[in-house]
Image: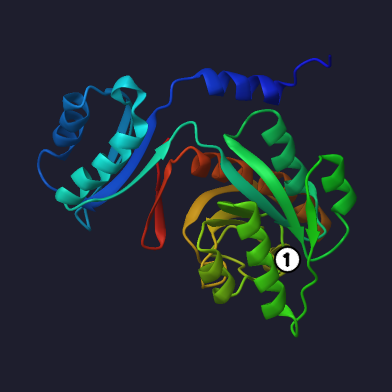
Amino acid sequence: MLPESKGQATAAVAAATPSTLVALLHGPDQPGLVARVAGWIFERGGNILHADQHRDTEAGIFFQRIEWEPANGDASADTSAFHRFAAGLGMQARVASSTHRTKVAVFVSKADHCFHDLILRSRAGDYTADFALVVSNHPDLGPMAAGYGLPFVHIPVTAATKAEAEARQIAVLRDAGIELVILARYMQVLSNDFLDGFGRPVINIHHSFLPAFAGGRPYHQAHSRGVKLIGATAHYATRDLDEGPIIQQDVARVTHRHAVEDLVRKGRDLEKTVLAQAVRWHLETRVLVYGNKTVVFD
């Protein structure tokens, strides 16, 4: 028998770990919210493991992330009851189980650095997720996906076929039960019809420190401006190109001695780490989207 991989071992440990619930909630600030949420969990026999909160003083909005062990492991009952409880406080809430394994699809084009990094992190057990599908507008990464044992779907996209291609993509995602799409340097702009039709989160990595240098060839734009910092931004894709809620960003220093190729090379390292962190936070239910911003609980 082959030795158990690290990813398999991690999955086995996760399967044996008691399920906890994680709630993200936000709404108008009011006295006693922390005590009332904690009291509700206590009254139901739950045990709070982690709690963090934030108040937007300008908008008067309260944000909280709280994780607890439900009594007798009855996660489903607590989930529905917590939504009712939060609504009674005038709060919006999202509740997730710590043992739920999100089904993920990765969209790629030709660049492979973010693709390899995500899959290898998944195989190492870094994510509570199942990477189930690779979709591309080019055939180049097909053999690499096959090497990882992942289904690869090649759907060419042109200006004339974009609507048809995106309809096929949505059908493929639905058939596979995909809950999250990661754009790992997928060099196509997703239409509003795609985002509405898929109806689930889409995380994109943009190779610049947004809002600077949005759109195409950002490293070339940065070099022509003589910047001293370059960056990468992971954000949720929305109807507005490169303007969705930002999850994570990072930067690296550059000088006049660096050519465009140097910026691209440095940028690739940033893109991998920024995207990996954003995906991890999303899967751990640490990202609360509010308007066009995010509150990320560490």
Give the number of callouts.
1
Q: Is residue 53 above or below residue 256?
A: above
Q: Residue at x 48, y 37 (%)?
A: 284
Q: Nearer the viewer, residue 214 or 50?
A: 50
Q: Residue at x 74, y 83 (%)?
A: 159
| Relative side of 23 to 157, left or right | left
Q: Nearer the viewer, residue 185 or 87?
A: 87
Q: Nearer the viewer, residue 57 or 241?
A: 241
Q: In this view of the protein, can residue 282 be seen by the observer?
A: yes
Residue 276, x across and y down, in percent: 62, 42
Residue 29, x across and y down, in percent: 17, 49
Please state, as top left, top right, bottom left or bottom right, where the N terminus lies in the image.
top right
Please state, as top left, top right, bottom left or bottom right, where the C terminus lies in the image.
top left
Crowding at label 1, few (<14), some or many (≥20) Cα neighbours within 10 Å? some
Amino acid under disc 1 = Met
Q: Which residue is mark 1?
A: 187
Residue 144, x across and y down, in percent: 86, 46
Q: Secondary structure at mark 1?
A: loop
Residue 286, x across and y down, in percent: 43, 41
